[in-house]
């Protein structure tokens, strides 16, 4: 007999949150929020090399079954939906912080503020970006492979997978492996937190995103030191994180208007690092498709198809 708990368990677990993708939906409006609205999204499929002609429901993309479940010694799921519920709370916070950011970013008086984001706001966005990176199936797989190399056959595979999820998504009180793996979360927070942050506003509402929405560029001479990061927040807002050596192009902790040059940069970087899909609130036009095609050499260098 199926218990009520099992019946209510969320099995399709999204690694790109639906609340995030809503910001890139043609039905989304920063002025009119509606949780019950049916949100859809357009996407470019790199595996098929084509753009969808029709938008699809956002709930139908970017999920895996039981992605965030952990298992006990017998291999059965324990603490059902624990990580899923923790991530859901984070996503609710995302909705609030995005709304607050939209209100500030579309008030031109705020463009004069020298420190556009408060310390608390920057801390949230850094934490959110870090967890977005660590919750990806590709990241979890990489960490699992590293753990296998470190521990060999000492730890059963199902325990290893559970440990990796506990480490990458640190919502449990104790980390089960006291190894360097436990430092993954702090590494990303410290790297991103040391960078300057600027908020770009696209009044045309044509910013795109991908199934790997946090773009990070590391220094050529030091791969573990970040040089730049880009995170689209919605079709109208994008965060740019940078080191001091880029201050001539980007201003420090301010809000600025995105022009065609920045739009090109976002499309090319999202295209280069996407796993298989780009997402947008519109069918890409000829100029945007040209940017996408021009990003292919960079995409191949970063391991894309």
Image: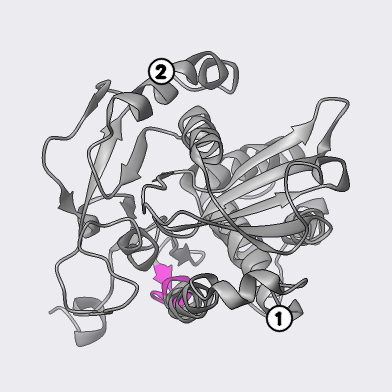
Looking at the image, is mark 1 or mark 2 earlier in the sequence?
A: 1
Judge by depth and name the residue closer to the eye, 32 or 107: 107
Mark 1 lies on residue: 120
Location of residue 54 (image quadrant): top left
Q: Residue at x 37, y 52 (%)?
A: 204
Q: Position of residue 3 (x, y in %)?
A: 19, 83
Judge by depth and name the residue closer to the eye, 244 or 36: 244
Residue 171 seen by the camera: no
Location of residue 57 (image quadrant): bottom left
Q: Position of residue 95 (x, y in %)?
A: 43, 76
Mark 2 lies on residue: 293
Residue 221 seen by the camera: yes
* Residue range (magenta): 77-84
Q: Residue at x 40, y 45 (%)?
A: 208
What number is the disc on residue 248?
none
| Label 1, label 2: how far apart the Cα atoms are | 38 Å
Q: Is 143 displayed left or right of 246 in the figure?
A: left
């Amino acid at each position: 007999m199926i218990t009520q708990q099992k019946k209510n368990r969320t099995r399709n677990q999204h690694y790109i949150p639906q609340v995030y993708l809503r910001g890139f939906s043609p039905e989304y409006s920063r002025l009119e929020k509606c949780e019950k609205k049916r949100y859809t999204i357009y996407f470019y499929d790199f595996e098929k090399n084509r753009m969808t002609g029709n938008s699809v429901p956002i709930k139908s993309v970017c999920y895996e079954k039981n992605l965030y479940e952990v298992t006990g010694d017998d291999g059965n799921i324990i603490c059902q939906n624990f990580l899923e519920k923790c991530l859901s709370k984070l996503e609710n916070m995302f909705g609030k912080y995005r709304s607050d950011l939209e209100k500030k970013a579309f008030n031109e008086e705020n463009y004069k503020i020298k420190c556009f984001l408060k310390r608390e706001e920057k801390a949230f966005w850094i934490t959110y970006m870090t967890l977005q990176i660590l919750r990806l199936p590709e990241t979890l797989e990489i960490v699992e492979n590293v753990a296998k190399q470190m521990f060999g056959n000492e730890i059963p595979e199902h325990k290893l997978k559970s440990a990796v999820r506990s480490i990458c998504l640190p919502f449990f009180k104790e980390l089960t492996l006291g190894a360097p793996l436990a430092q993954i979360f702090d590494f990303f927070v410290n790297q991103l937190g040391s960078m300057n942050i600027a908020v770009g506003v696209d009044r045309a509402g044509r910013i795109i995103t991908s199934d790997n929405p946090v773009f990070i560029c590391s220094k050529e001479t030091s791969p573990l030191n970040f040089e730049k990061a880009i995170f689209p927040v919605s079709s109208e807002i994008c965060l740019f994180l940078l080191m001091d050596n880029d201050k001539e192009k980007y201003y420090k902790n301010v809000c600025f208007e995105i022009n065609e040059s920045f739009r090109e940069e976002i499309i090319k970087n999202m295209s280069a690092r996407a796993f298989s899909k780009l997402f947008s609130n519109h069918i890409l036009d000829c100029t945007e498709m040209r940017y996408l095609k021009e990003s292919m050499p960079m995409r191949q260098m970063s391991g894309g198809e």
